[in-house]
Amino acid sequence: MHVKRFDFIFLITVACLSFSTNFVASTTCCAEKPQTQKQTKRRHTSKNVTAYRDVVYATIGKKEILLDLYVPKNATIKPPLLVWIHGGGWRSGSKDSCRLYRETQRGYAVASLNYRLTHEAMFPAQIHDCKGAIRWLRANAEKFGYNADRIGVAGSSAGGQLVALLGTSGGVKELEGNVGGNLDQSSDVQAVCDFYGATNFHTIIKQRNQVKSRPSSVLAKLFGGTVEEKPEVATLASPVTFLDKTDPPFLIIHGAKDNVVPVEQSTSFEKLVKQVNVPVTLIILEEAGHGGKPFNSKETIQQMQFFFDKHLKKTD
């Protein structure tokens, strides 16, 4: 487990404020098709997979925060674990839309998380919940029978931002929180697949060619104010803030025609990841926007599978 210091965040924030007159958070920024956590559940089933559904990994007040866990039966070795984090602009979405379930047929255990949405709590609640879930999954690995030394995470849109932040912020006290306990466990992950997530909230609005702040935006709901009003929160929420050489490998997949999270979020992030000598692969889908069929194509899925196999199934 690596620990990073946050002593210079003020300097980062001041540097980023020089762009502040151009920042605005669109109501659609990082938002996929709205859905609620009360939506009709998609019940994944397979005779060779044990499903543990609606498992409570944390309780906050009267709210139980849930995950689903799928573990292959009769595995000869403990499988590595893949964790899916849903999108939805941090305001909607559910663990029930798990895009990784098929990987149970390829020798992986799979978990899919709920986390608190913006009508329930503002940032950093979302990353606190995700880190709490990783710690819970590590603490319960022996009980459920998977390898918690090899955890990969994937997510799209808002989920992409959260998995990228999981990847870069290991040990950052402000983002660890204590959700779910298990504080003796690490929240580190060993591989990150980011589907079109935001990586730098101080540049995303300018990249969208917007010049006026909107207090009703999804980012304002996430941060408790606009980027200009909450620059320190925007810095904390930006995966780019915490990049260093101890971070896990990244696979980034983004649509060239994305008008919600501009592809420049990923191209700029890739360059910075390379600068700290962390393995990174960026795949730009030329005809894709913000989500859609190109991300579910056979070729795209195979690229994700190759990435996780390379980093999680490797032999020591």
Image (tube, helix red, strand yellow):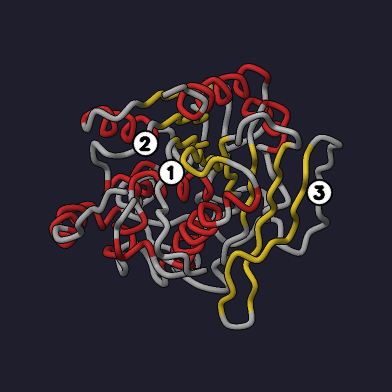
Under mark 3, the amino acid is Arg
* Numbered label attached to residue 189: 1
* Numbered label attached to residue 42: 3
Residue 289: % across, % down: 57, 32
The residue that mark 2 highlights is: 248
| Foreground disc of the pair 3, 1 | 1
In depth, the one of 135 and 96 nearer the eye is 135
Left or right of 71 in this view: 87: left
Asked which secondary structure carries label 2, the reply is: loop
Left or right of 155 in this view: 245: left
Whole-number angstrom distance, CA of label 2 to CA of label 1:
7 Å
Task: Quarter of the image for the C terminus: give it.
Answer: top left
Question: Is 63 located above or below residue 116 in the figure?
Answer: below
Pointer 3 with pointer 1, Cβ within 8 A: no
- Image-quadrant location for residue 276: top left
Asked which secondary structure carries label 3, the reply is: loop
Q: Which callout, 2 or 3, points at the residue further toward the start of the chain?
A: 3
Residue 176: % across, % down: 37, 62
Pointer 2 with pointer 1, Cβ within 8 A: yes
Residue 66: % across, % down: 66, 63
Under mark 2, the amino acid is Pro
Question: Is 305 located above or below residue 202 in the figure?
Answer: above
Residue ID at (76%, 64%): 38
